[in-house]
Image: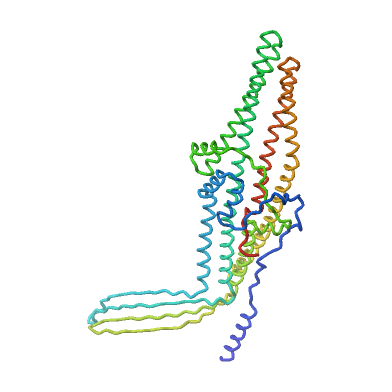
Amino acid sequence: MKILRSIGCACISLWLGACATQAPPPSVPAPVPPHWHAPLPAEDDAARLPHDGALNGLSQWWRQQGDPLLVQLIEAAQAISPTAATASSRIEQARYARVAAGAALLPSVDASASISRSNPQPPIPLNTALQGGVQSSWELDLFGGNRANRDAAQARLEGAEAGWHDARVSIAAEVATRYYSLRACDKLAVVTRSDAGSRAHTARLTQLSTEAGFQSPANAALARASAAEAASRATQQRAQCDLDIKALVALSGLPEPELRQKIAEVPGVLPQSAAMAITALPAGTLTQRPDIFSAQREVAAASADVGSADAERYPRLSLNGSIAAATVRTGGVTANLETWSIGPLSLTLPLFDGGRRAANADAARARYEEAAALYRASVRQAVREVEEALVNLDSTAARSADAQLAVDGYRTSFFAVEARYEGGLASLFELEEARRSRLVAEITLISLQRDRTAAWIALYRAAGGGWSSPAPQ
């Protein structure tokens, strides 16, 4: 019998030594190009983004634009945004999950107390029993399953914290995009109102000339149609500006009358130079993106989940203990009892579960592969976003000078044709053609300024909004 016990203990020891969880690597390579293919912004007028995740760091770039109202709207939106609130709640949930996972590595201690009074069959007297004790249990983490759960919870906590910063960056970019859209809309509204007034003036002159017999009724009808079209365009543009204001009201939570007053008090200017420096190495820029960091931490968490699921397939060793004291009083006699125990030291050997543990481990590996694929996809998407923002910046910069020259040329041509028309030396068709060319050029220039600002905002967001990872991963 002793020989059999010895052989059994030896076999168990060999089994324990041979068993080991095989978790996949906590980080995976991502397809990052060696350099950016799109032209980088000029370094001479660039302002580097701050590299911290605090509130001032996130809003510092916006403060450099010199528009205090924009900073106020961003801070108000970040304070009430449900996206930021959800991200903050996820941090708290992840933090509590981390505490619970870490507690599994420590012994658990529970206290119990009881009192009873009984009336046995006479002549046995009444008896009273008081009992109290402390029980403890501790699972020895032989194969690292509990440690893996703790590591997974820690990785998800770090990812949730990065997700909070990503939410704030997204909110800032959304508010800024809508704000500058409103500013561009106001400038377009000025252009369309001016065009409508000019066409109305031409219609009045044409009507007077028609009544005097110098113009045909067809020209008068054309002038009236042109004035009506311009008035309709101006009304439509004003409605678009109102929609932008209402969107900002929803984002910031400010009352609409207060927001309209603030907008009216601050001159509407689209930033001409909102540059930021961006490193020539994509890997360096992508480390500033909180969503990339969060996706990488999810890979690490999925890797730890695989280790935890694998550990469930192997033996488990636990140690129990207790200390108890009891007082029994019966027939006027009191007896005190004290007991303690260490053990049992129990070993649980999984023999048959119908493939449940193996299936759980395979499912954890499948989730790891999914997390790795999502991480690689997020890196590719980040590279695409930066490249697109750089392309748009380069394109708008190259077109800006030509667009300004076109506005100046068409404006000069229109004034000349208008003077000739009022002197009877140009036809109404020539005037309308010159007016149409001038309007298109002015709208194109303002739209180009808006697109360039949107490209800067897109680059701000694509570069991580000034956030940097807490440690190299």
Using the rendered view, name the quadrant where residue 184 is placed.
top right
Q: Quadrant of the C terminus?
A: bottom right
**Going 61% across and 41% down the picture, which residue do you hit?**
180
Q: How many numbered dots are placed on residues in this image?
A: 0
In front: 22, or 235?
235
In front: 341, or 387?
387
Give the percent coordinates (x, y) of residue 296: 64, 61
In front: 138, or 261?
261
Would residue 108 be seen by someone viewing this image from the given angle?
yes
Give the percent coordinates (x, y) of residue 316: 55, 76
Using the rendered view, name the quadrant where residue 374 is placed.
bottom right
Give the percent coordinates (x, y) of residue 401: 74, 38
Give the percent coordinates (x, y) of residue 347: 54, 79
In front: 159, or 286?
286
Report the side of 467 relative to 421 (left or right). Answer: left
Q: Residue furthest top?
A: 213
**Going 59% across and 52% down the picture, which residue do you hit?**
60
What's the image's color scheme? Answer: rainbow
**Going 66% across and 13% down the picture, which residue do you hit?**
207
Q: Quadrant of the N terminus?
A: bottom right
**Going 73% across and 36% down the picture, which residue do you hit?**
403
Q: Residue furthest bottom?
A: 2
Q: Is residue 166 above or below residue 175?
A: below
Report the side of 235 relative to 28 (left or right). Answer: left
Q: Is residue 347 above or below residue 35?
A: below
Using the rendered view, name the quadrant where residue 327 is placed.
bottom left
Would residue 473 be seen by someone viewing this image from the given angle?
no
Report the side of 214 relative to 84 (left or right). Answer: right
